[in-house]
Image (spheres, grey):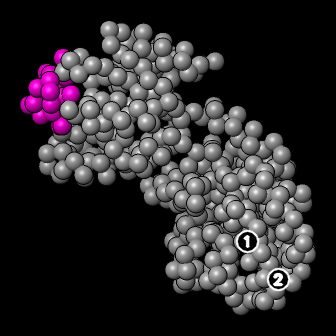
Amino acid sequence: MGKVVKVKNVYIGSGKPKICAIVLGETGSEILELAAQANEINCDLIEFRADHYAHIRDLEKAKDIAAKVRHTCRKPIIFTCRRKEEGGKQEITIEEYKKLLKMVSECYYAELIDVEASAIGDDPSFVEMLKDNGSYVIISKHDFEKTPMFEEIMQDLSNMKDLGADIVKVAYMPNSKRDVLNLINASVNMANMYDFCPIIAISMGHLGTVTRIIGEFMESAITFASITKSSAPGQIPIDGLESVLNVIHENFRKVFLIGFMGTGKTAVANALASNYGLNKIDLDAYIEMKEHMSIADIFASQSESVFRDKETKHLRHVIKGNYQVISLGGGIVLRSENIEMIKEKGVIVLLTASAETIRDRVKNDKTRPLLGENFDLDYVKDLMKSREELYNSVADVVIDTENKTIDQICKEIVETLGFLN
C-alpha cells in the first residue's frame, strides 16, 4: 500500500492488519456493554454496526446511541450502517442513510465512516463533505452471492479510490478457491501501486476465512473480528486472533541495515543473500535504477531535499516487496516517516565503525555526495556525530563492524536475531 492512514496512534496500511472488534446489538444497553468490552480486549479499532440497532431510523435516537458509544470507546471508531442491499439488518432509504452518516460526521462520533459505494454512485461530493468535517472515509462494496473476476475487482478498488476514499473495502462471497485467489491477487496488485490507499479485502464464508488472517501477505489493512455475535459470514472470534497475526508477522519480519556511509551495509546485505539464501535489496541502488541517475547526480542537480523525497517514495514501494534484507542509505533516519515505516515492518540493525575506519573505507569513493572531496577526519566525525543520537534511538540491534570480516558480521546478525531458526 502506498499511503498509510494514521488515526490516533493506529497506522492503518502498515505492518500487521489492524484488528477491528465488532460492536452490534438491538438495544442501547447491549451495544454499550459490548463497547465497554471492546476497550479491554486486544483490538486496535472498534466498528459500531449501527444497522443492528432497533431505532437506527430515528435520527434523534441514533444520535443519542452514537454519542454514548463515542463516550464509552477509547479506541478509534468506524461507524457503519449497512443498508439491506449490502447485507444490513434494516430497510433504510438512501436519504435516511446519508442523513445518518452526515450527523455522525458533523458531531464527530467516529473517526472513520464506512460509505457504501452503491449509495453514492459516481458523485464524490458526499464523500468530500464527510472528509471536510474531519472524518476518514472507507468506501465499501459487498456481494453476498459471488466474487467478480480479477479485472473487475481491480476496477472496483480503483473506482472507489477515485471517489475520494481514504480506505477502500471489498467483501465478496467466494464459490471456489479460485475466487479467493482472485481477490488476493487483486489486492496485492492494487496495493503495490504508488500512492494507492489502504485496502481491506475480505473473502466471506468458510472458503474465505484465510483472508481474515493473512492480511499482511495480501496487503489487506484491517481484519474484523466478533466479540460475541458475528456480523458477516466467516468472521473469526477475536479471542486468539492476535496470536495468529503475530505468528504470520514474525515470518514476514524484515532486517533493515542502517548506519553511516562506509559501515558495510551493502556488502553485508550481499553476503547475507549469498551465504544464507535471503532476498535482499539495496535502496540506493534501487533509486538510481528508477531515477536513471546516480545519487551523487541527484544531489548535485536537484538538491538533497529532492533526494530525500525520492528516497521516501521508493522506500514505501520497496518495503512491500518480498525482501528479507534491505540495505538503507545513511540518511534514512533523517525523516520520521521513514523510521515509522521500517519500525513497523521489521528489525533495525545498526552497523557502526570508528570515524578513522569510515574515512579509510570511503576516501577513494567519489560517489559519496555528502563528502564530495572532503575527507578530513574532523569533518567525518562531525557528520557522524550529527546522526549518532538518531541512529541509536531507532536501532533494535547494534553491530560493531570494527576489525571484523563481512562473514563475521553476517554470522553475528543471524545469531543475534535467530533469523534462520
Residue lying at the far left of the rendered structure: 373
**Which residue occupies 27% across, 24% down?**
262
- Name above or below for residue 104 compared with residue 216: below
Can residue 339 be seen from the camera position used here? yes
Q: In the image shown, does 391 or 80 lie closer to the viewer?
A: 391
Q: CA distance from mark 2 to mark 1?
A: 18 Å
SS for tag 2? Answer: loop
Amino acid, disc 2: Ile
Which mark, residue 30? none
Measured from the top left, where is residue 293 in percent x and y? 22, 42
**Which residue occupies 87% across, 84% down?**
55
Measured from the top left, where is residue 320 in percent x and y? 51, 43
- Circle 1 sits on which residue? 71
**Which residue occupies 26% across, 48% down?**
307
Q: In the image shown, does 214 or 309 lie closer to the viewer?
A: 309
Q: Quadrant of residue 145?
A: bottom right
- Circle 2 sits on which residue? 56
**Which residue occupies 85% across, 50% down?**
237
Point out the tag, 2 or 1, that comes first from the N-terminus: 2
Q: Quadrant of residue 385?
A: top left
Can residue 81 be seen from the camera position used here? no
